Amino acid sequence: MRFILSCFLIINTILLVAQPVCNSENRYIDSVFSQVDITTNIWFGNANPFNPFSSNQDLYLDFYEPHGDTASARPLIIHAFGGGFLSGNRTSDDIPYWADQYVKKGYVFVSIDYRLGYNPTSASSVERAAYRCAQDYNAALRFLADNASTYRIDLNNVIVTGNSAGSIGALIVAFMDDNDRPGFTYLHHFRGKRFGLF
């Protein structure tokens, strides 16, 4: 009996070790990975901040991926935090929760920086803040597209998301092209006007 039980345990152990990391039939629907790997502080660009008298702001992203994943091209979910264009950051408390939900299903998840700040007494300043968010979002997308093979991203499957203000940036990225860009988002349009750069 002891011999049969030992054989049963050895066979089951071999079967467990031999199981693939991911059952492709359930990938993207069920949680098929148990762990998430995070690479933080990946620089993707810099740009003028809201305060024109400050130096350019460096922008970073955090990259979440399934531990042990061997897929050569994974769908990307890229996320911008909320905070009314005045506060928040790419490490906000809710972001690891969302990353965990998607990455364990086989997606890669990226949380990005974007520039904050605007003059709350100026409607056009708020709109420029939303457009700055979208510009930084697009910069992150360009960086990830340029490095798709390094990060094993499927560029045919990219999902843009965000919380609150970040979702406004995601909507601009998804539905507005450069031909739709409002004139007041160009520096020459409002330089020297009553609201100036603010």
Image: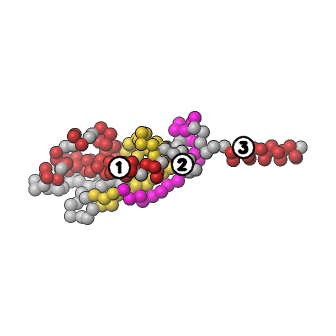
Q: Amino acid at mark 1?
A: Arg
The residue located at (27%, 62%) in the rendering is: 56
Task: From the viewer's side, name the closer residue of 10 and 85.
Answer: 10
x and y percent of residue 127 in the render?
22, 46
Residue 53 % position (x, y): 21, 64
Task: Write down the residue under mark 3.
Answer: 15
Q: Secondary structure at mark 3?
A: helix
Residue 136: in magenta span: no
Q: Are marks 3 and 1 in contact (CB under 8 Å)?
A: no
Give the position of the N terminus as an image quadrant: top right
- Relative to 60, is 56 on the left or the right? left
- Residue 36: say if magenta: yes
Q: Which residue is mark 1?
A: 142
Measure how far apart labels 3 and 1 are at the Cα level. Answer: 42 Å
Q: Which residues are magenta?
A: 25-44
Which of pointers 3 and 1 lies earlier in the amino acid sequence?
Answer: 3
On the question of residue 27 being in view, the answer is yes
Q: Find residue 178 and report its image quarter.
A: top left
Question: Whole-Å distance between the Cαs marked 2 and 3?
Answer: 22 Å
Q: Residue at x 30, y 38 (%)?
A: 175
